[in-house]
Image (cartoon, rainbow, N blue to C red):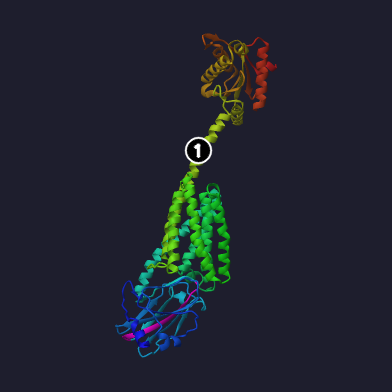
Amino acid sequence: MAAARSAAIPVVPLSASPSGVPLAGKVGFLEDPEGTLVIADIRSSAVDQRFSIPPGAVQQDGLDDHARWFKIRIRQTEPAGEWLIDSSNTALRTFDVYGPYSDNGAMLAPPSKQGFAQAAGGRWLNSDRFNFRFALAQPGDYTIYIRATSVFSEYYSFTAWEPVQFGHAEQRRSMFNGICYGLFIGMIFYNLMLLWIFDESLYFYNFLSCLFALLTLSGINGHLGHYVLHNHTALIPIVLGASPALWIAFAGMFGRGFLELQKFAPKLNVCMLALMPLASVAVALAFCGQFSASLALTQLLSVAGPLLMFAGAIIALRRGFTPAAWYITGIFTLFLAAICTTLNNNGIIQFPFHYEALQIGSLFEIIIFIIALGSRIRGIRRQNGELGKRAKQLTKTARTDPLTGLLNRAGWAHYAARTLDRGGSAALLLIDLDKFKPVNDQHGHAAGDQVLKLVAERLQAEVGAQGVVARLGGDEFVILLADAPDSKVLALQAGKLIDLISLPVPYEGHALSVSASIGIACVPQDGADLSMLMHAADRAMYDIKENGRAGHAFACTAAS
């Protein structure tokens, strides 16, 4: 019976195929729940007959620590050769290989013991994954036994390789991994740059999310153990247990900020926050060595977190937050990859790959999130631009007289102060309309407003680019001339202004008439700051009013 069972396991011819020789469906499998069987037991007739041949790869959900035995029968047709059995696994606690055994039962090589439970060194010197390299000196049939244990989800699928062809295949795989790692590293620095520019916590959360995603994937691919922690193997399962939970947690915090859940979906925001303590528990369990419990909790988070964020993104999109559309695409891609990985780990569905789905999903999510962040930044810039325009409009309104369109007192003070600060000669003309009150009393305020608007237009047209005109309030105007001419030219300009103001103003068939008194103050004779100039010009203006109105006077003359 034992011989029949053993014979049922097919003998696989070895060859130097560029794609290796897949052994799925051709390997004997035996599960040892207690983990007590040793190689002598395995090779006994009583135990050998218990081997079965799974139709495909053997899956482990990571929630047990059973030992799993594999029996591989191979045939070498060449006179001699070197070969390699690749497990495709990177996170095994033990990977013990016995053999090869010849047909007569002779053991041709000492046992090979690898894995986290062993001392540092060994397997990380040759490959990112657990494999066994051996040499056969002559043609014939041989048997190899492998005992594997793990505290994580595993997908046991063995391939026989000629070492040179295995090296070529590893180069192609390394290129794909390099692209993934490069994108993650680029995203890490991208978020640091955005954090420095915008000082928003969501970019810090996305930085941490990308960092722990990189740790997770590099750990799953074996590169973390190969290049970083090869002398600290006890840390590898801790990192592999804690990093996925932290990845999910910080990705959730990034999603909360990106989608503004507190604004658009406050209830989902509370639910998302409630998942954060669960992530902390999963991390704590990993540090305590409870990897099965940590993995179970992390798998729960990997489903619940993306579902909540997907629902939040739908709500935000419906409320007009357009970058949520890109976020939905990205989170759906990663969610689908996480679901496939979880279902695959638990044997509910079977794929011809293991964690590659998660890596591919993460790759697409990174690309989509770069676009999503760009869309959000464009939206912020557009909003800031609109706010800037609105602020300028409000500032202009606050500094403009609504009746005449001239600067008001606040706008005048701002402009005049800046002009005077530049230094040089300047002249201030303070204008007060004469006979304006009778216009209001006899024809109404609408007539007075018409007079004020037409006077403003005449003053603005006359001054032009030489200076600025403002209405200080009531019937009082002021003009500031930069690079002012001498007093004779100023006197002529003041006279011309009075003539313009005195021109009739047509209103409902009436010719309304006003005149003006102008006080003139000059820099530096009458002062250097606005307050001194206004005071001097006001004194000169009232001097004119006391002497018959409709004229102009210089402050220095009025003072004397």
Residue 546 lies, with reference to residue 222, above or below; the image says above
Q: From what the image shows, is residue 207 above or below residue 456?
A: below
Secondary structure under the numbered disc 1 in the rendered image: helix
- Hey, which quadrant is residue 271 in on the image? bottom right
Q: Is residue 172 left or right of residue 92?
A: left
Q: Position of residue 17 (x, y in %)?
A: 31, 74
How many dots with numbers? 1
Can you identify the residue that label 1 sits on?
386
User: If the image is split into quadrants, where does the C terminus sit?
Assistant: top right
Q: Residue at x 57, y 69 (%)?
A: 287
The reply to whether the magenta stretch includes residue 140 is yes
Please state the horizontal and vertical placement of residue 272, each as a whole percent of the image: 54, 55
Residue interval drawn in magenta = 138-151
The quadrant in which the N terminus is found is: bottom left
Residue 179 within the magenta-colored segment of the rendering: no
Say what amino acid the circle numbered 1 marks: Glu
Direction from residue 433 to residue 258 in the image, left or right: left
For image coordinates 49% across by 48% down, the residue present is: 316
On the question of residue 102 being in view, the answer is: no
Which residue is more in the foreground, 47 or 262? 47
Q: Is residue 169 visible?
A: yes
